[in-house]
Image (spheres, helix red, strand yellow):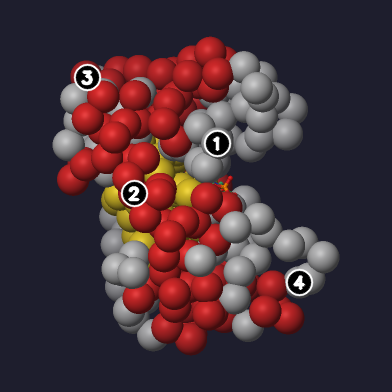
């Protein structure tokens, strides 16, 4: 049951916040509903969840249409430039901006529909081959400062995905890297507030390291069944 799973997650978040001397109000829980159907989203919605995360433009677009404006959508996946308009139409936040070209495209489309699009820059904080994100501090700085020229973008923070490993120290290190980058950029004149980090297997560490947005899927909805396409579940 989603309500029970959700309760467990929320209790774990409060416990961890207490340990880390943080207030739970600093932390936004984003329920990652990718590959789950509308019934699962509705069940979490009925439990009071309003923030949901999706990683595919078309899937988000379809789900957005079903829920009108009741839900705050977060786009957390790899975004191709030709899909930008779907995502800008539906997402309150785009967490996965990893190039200036993409930021520029988002700005352009947001301008067309008169929107200020909230974005986060995705940073690669580990050496894993498969993780996307901006590599290197100087490139991040360049992109982050350049975003100030884009009048239809509001850069609100940084996002990362920890390496896929059992080694908790490496995961913690990756989160700490993101935290330090945020502080550094803010010391140089930016005003980044959000750190989007932490998933089902590592959100406890993310809370310790300063996360403000947790992206949690399977702990809330159960294991994802990839044998069926999302379209079959709507
Ligand atoms: C799927 C996904 C999550 C959630 O993963 P779980 O392990 O199910 O909590 C978080 N962030 C991103 C970018 C994802 O693609």
Which secondary structure, mark 4?
loop
Write down the residue under mark 1: 201
Q: Nearer the viewer, mark 3 or mark 2?
A: 2
Quick one: 151 or 22, which is closer to the camera?
Answer: 22
Looking at the image, residue 45 sits to the left or right of residue 86; the answer is left
Q: Which residue is mark 3?
A: 187
Q: Is residue 42 shown above or below 49?
A: below
Q: Is the distance from the Cβ of mark 1 to the nearest ligand 1 atom less than 8 Å?
A: yes
Upstream in sequence: badge 1 or badge 4 = 1
Q: In the rendered view, would you say 67 is above or below 1?
A: below
Mark seen at residue 40: none
Q: Position of residue 175 (x, y in %)?
A: 45, 24
Mark 2 lies on residue = 10
Q: Nearer the viewer, mark 1 or mark 3?
A: 1
Q: Determine whether, in the image, residue 151 is placed left or right of residue 63.
A: left
Query: Which tag is nearer the camera, tag 4 or tag 2?
Result: 2
- Secondary structure state at the residue bearing disc 3: helix
Q: CA distance from mark 3 to mark 2?
A: 33 Å
- The residue positioned 40% from the left and 49% from the top of the image is 8
Q: Determine which quarter of the picture holds residue 142.
A: top left
User: Residue at coordinates 62% horizontally, 27% vertically from top-left?
Assistant: 163
Q: Is residue 73 visible?
A: no
Instruction: Tell me, for residue 229, which label it has, or none.
Output: 4
Q: Residues within 10 Å of mark 1 (few under 14, many from 20)?
A: some
Residue 113 coordinates in the image, percent (x, y): 36, 76
Q: How much space separates mark 3 and mark 4, taking CA atoms?
A: 45 Å
- Label 4 and label 2: CA atoms lie apart by 29 Å
**Distance between mark 1 and mark 4 Cα atoms:** 24 Å
Closer to the chain start, of discs 3 and 2, is 2
Q: Can you give x and y, in whole percent of width and height, for residue 216 in the image?
A: 48, 49
């Amino acid at each position: 049951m989603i309500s029970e799973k959700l309760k467990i997650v929320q209790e774990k978040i409060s416990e961890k916040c207490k340990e880390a001397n943080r207030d739970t109000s600093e932390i936004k829980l984003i329920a990652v509903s990718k590959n789950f159907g509308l019934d699962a989203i509705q069940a979490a919605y009925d439990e009071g969840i309003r923030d949901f995360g999706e990683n595919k433009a078309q899937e988000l677009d379809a789900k957005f249409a079903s829920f009108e404006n009741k839900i705050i959508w977060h786009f957390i996946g790899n975004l191709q430039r030709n899909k930008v308009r779907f995502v800008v139409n539906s997402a309150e936040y785009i967490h996965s901006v990893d190039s200036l070209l993409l930021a520029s495209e988002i700005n352009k489309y947001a301008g067309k529909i008169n929107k200020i699009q909230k974005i986060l820059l995705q940073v690669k904080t580990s050496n894993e081959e498969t993780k996307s994100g901006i590599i290197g501090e100087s490139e991040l700085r360049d992109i982050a400062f350049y975003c100030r020229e884009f009048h239809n973008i509001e850069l609100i923070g940084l996002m990362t995905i920890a390496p896929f490993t059992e080694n908790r120290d490496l995961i913690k290190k990756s989160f700490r890297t993101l935290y330090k980058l945020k502080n550094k950029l803010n010391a140089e004149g930016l005003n980044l507030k959000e750190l989007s980090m932490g998933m089902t297997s590592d959100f406890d560490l993310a809370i310790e390291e300063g996360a403000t947005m947790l992206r949690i899927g399977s702990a809330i909805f159960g294991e994802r069944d990839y044998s069926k396409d999302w379209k079959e579940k709507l």
